[in-house]
């Protein structure tokens, strides 16, 4: 595996529910991960990319979503050259979610049956978002450029899709070599360094399957660098935060 360049576009924070957003560059192919950080503000993301890397949102080759929770995923009107990569398994889950909305079971009953733990603040958002345009994938800005991916496949030659199912159904991440060593983009399998140091996940607001979430967290323990869902990057073995010296840091 050759080294992939990684830069923060937005550092995740807990209080504002902002997720971490990173820009990866694999030999000239640019991959933007979880731009939900910018919560609908396309111009702010475009400005952050220009400040970080001198490119605009329309120059991005691949937008990759670790999972489709509303704080990570948004349709920001991606340009004609941009492919949008989403977990095949999670997309199937959303098809069932929308079917439950339309065919009688109802969104609330579906969520209660599917999620092992869903705090009221998240449940209310999920119910509301069942009717949000961003989950109408057939009419998304990227409808013709949607790429479904599965764990084990190469997103680009040096970026491997990994299975992090548990927090969300079908959740995925990315595994690569960077200047920080073996690096994982963890989505919400790990929320932060504090979360990684916690013995259990009782403080989590949402998880789909408890046992799978614990297994996903375990699988990240050997990496040199973890980009968590909602906090600064860290080194799991030493429990040290990693200083990110480039990019536009905010939060
Ligand atoms: Zn999430």
Image (cartoon, helix red, strand yellow):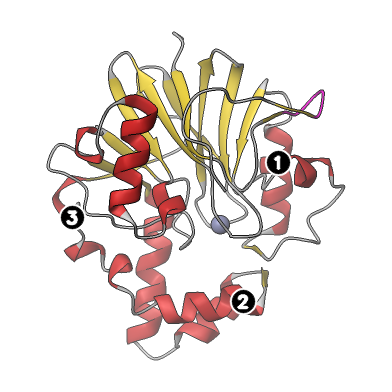
Indicate which quadrant contains ligand 1: bottom right
Horizontal placement of 18 versus 34: left or right?
right
Callout in the foreground (1, 2) = 2
- Place of residue 211 in the rendered image (x, y in percent of width and height, measured from the top left): 73, 53
**Residue drawn at point x = 49 percent, y = 51 percent:** 170
Q: Disc number at residue 121?
A: 2
Query: What SS does tag 2 mark?
Result: helix
Q: Quadrant of residue 238?
A: top right
Mark-to-mark CA distance, 1 and 2: 24 Å
The magenta segment is 235-239
The residue that mark 3 highlights is 143
Q: Disc number at residue 217?
A: 1
First of labels 1, 2 by sequence position: 2
| Relative vertical location of residue 44 with respect to residue 208 in this rendering, above or below | above
| Relative vertical location of residue 155 with respect to residue 2 in this rendering, above or below | below
Q: Residues within 10 Å of mark 3 (few under 14, many from 20)?
A: few
- Place of residue 233 in the rendered image (x, y in percent of width and height, measured from the top left): 64, 32
Query: What SS does tag 1 mark?
Result: helix
First of labels 1, 3 by sequence position: 3
Q: Residues within 10 Å of mark 1 (few under 14, many from 20)?
A: some
Is residue 232 located in the magenta-colored stretch of the structure? no
């Amino acid at each position: 595996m050759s080294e992939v360049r990684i830069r923060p576009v937005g550092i995740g924070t807990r209080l504002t529910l902002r997720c971490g957003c990173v820009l990866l560059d694999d030999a000239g192919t640019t991959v933007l991960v979880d731009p939900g950080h910018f919560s609908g503000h396309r111009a702010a993301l475009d400005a952050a990319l220009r400040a970080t890397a001198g490119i605009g949102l329309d120059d991005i080759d691949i937008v990759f979503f670790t999972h489709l929770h509303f704080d990570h995923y948004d349709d920001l009107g991606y340009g004609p050259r941009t492919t949008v990569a989403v977990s095949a398994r999670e997309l199937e889950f959303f098809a069932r979610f929308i079917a439950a909305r339309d065919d009688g079971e109802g969104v609330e009953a579906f969520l209660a049956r599917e999620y092992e733990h869903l705090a009221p603040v998240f449940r209310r958002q999920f119910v509301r978002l069942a009717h949000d345009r961003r989950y109408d994938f057939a009419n998304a800005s990227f409808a013709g450029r949607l790429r479904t991916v599965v764990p084990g496949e190469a997103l680009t030659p040096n970026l491997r899709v990994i299975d992090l199912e548990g927090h969300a159904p079908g959740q995925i991440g990315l595994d690569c070599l960077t200047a920080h060593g073996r690096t994982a983009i963890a989505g919400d399998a790990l929320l932060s360094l504090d979360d990684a140091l916690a013995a259990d996940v009782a403080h989590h607001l949402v998880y789909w399957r408890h046992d799978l979430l614990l297994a996903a967290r375990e699988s990240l323990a050997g990496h040199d660098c973890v980009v968590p869902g909602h906090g600064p990057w860290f080194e799991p073995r030493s429990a040290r935060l990693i200083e990110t010296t480039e990019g536009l840091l905010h939060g």
